[in-house]
Amino acid sequence: MTGTGTGVGKTVVTAALAATASGSVAVLKPAQTGTVGDDEGDTAAIGRMTGGVERTTGGVTTLELARHRDPLAPAVAARREGASPVTPERIVAAVARLAASHDLVLVEGAGGLLVPYDDYGGTLADAAGSLAAPVLVVCPAGLGALNASALTVRELRHRGLDCPGLVIGSRPSDPDLAARCNAADLPAVTGVPLLGALPEGAGRLRGAEFHAVAVSGLAPALGGEWDAVGLGAAR
């Protein structure tokens, strides 16, 4: 799970995928930055959103490998603390451990695809390459989405990685012209389908209410019932 940048809704989309998935699910956050002490990190937020969702296989397992106080790229945040970085190899090993006891492992990256995790330039893309894992891209609804999404998908293709599609992480209830046009233009510009759009504020929900939003906001390919018809602007 990657995004076109920070704050686009990766955590909410990850939680939605976990909520709608069949089988046992684990969510890995390799490095959490910008948190201090007992601040709620992304894994805790995912646990909160998916908590109380009725699942025949139990709850969602979450794992955080490292936590850093500075809101920076993981490599930089670790260096400033004198901490060991989370390398792509550590991510791969953690996924292997989780995969041994779960049907699905979701990995939520930090920031965008090429954000460095270690001082050698290791990225989430490197870990995905070692795992031969598909990478879903979370993008914003409005201005800037087309360029950032196209660049991210192009880099995935350049690395030979599969990108099943895009999900808009936070779509306003009253979208402006750019958001309406982007919903129609993103597939044409990137060459991959739009597989969902979660409503703004979904991250404040939990349990059955969050599950209902996840189902209605994700396409059938991702375990939901979302339909893009009527989402874009009139041409």
Image (spheres, rainbow, N blue to C red):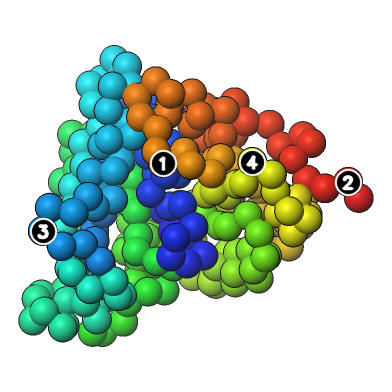
Q: Earlier in the sequence, mark 4 or mark 3?
A: 3
Q: Secondary structure at mark 4?
A: loop
> What residue is drawn where x is 48% and y is 42%?
201
Q: Earlier in the sequence, mark 2 or mark 1?
A: 1
Kind of residue at badge 3: Gly
Q: Is 205 located above or below residue 9 in the figure?
A: above
Q: Do we see residue 167 in this rendering?
A: no
Disc 3 to disc 2: CB gap under 8 Å: no
Q: Is 141 located above or below residue 56 in the figure?
A: below
Closer-to-camera residue (186/87): 186
Please tell me in which quadrant of the rendered image residue 205 appears.
Answer: top left
> Could you tell me residue 45's position as x and y percent?
29, 43
Tell me if 9 is positioned left or right of 62 in this view. right
Tell me if 114 is positioned left or right of 52 in this view. right
Residue picked out by circle 2: 234
Real-space Cα separation, disc 3 to disc 1, in angstroms: 21 Å
Please tell me in which quadrant of the rendered image residue 61 appears.
Answer: top left
> Could you tell me residue 71's position as x and y percent?
29, 71
Q: Secondary structure at mark 1?
A: helix
Q: Earlier in the sequence, mark 3 or mark 2?
A: 3
> In this view, which residue lies farthest toward the right?
235
Residue picked out by circle 3: 37
Residue depth check, mark 2 versus mark 1: number of the one nearer the observer: 1
Kind of residue at badge 4: Ser
Residue picked out by circle 1: 203
Residue depth check, mark 2 versus mark 4: number of the one nearer the observer: 4
Closer-to-camera residue (134/37): 37
Kind of residue at badge 1: Gly
Disc 4 to disc 1: CB gap under 8 Å: no
Residue picked out by circle 4: 173
> In this view, which residue lies farthest toward the front?
174
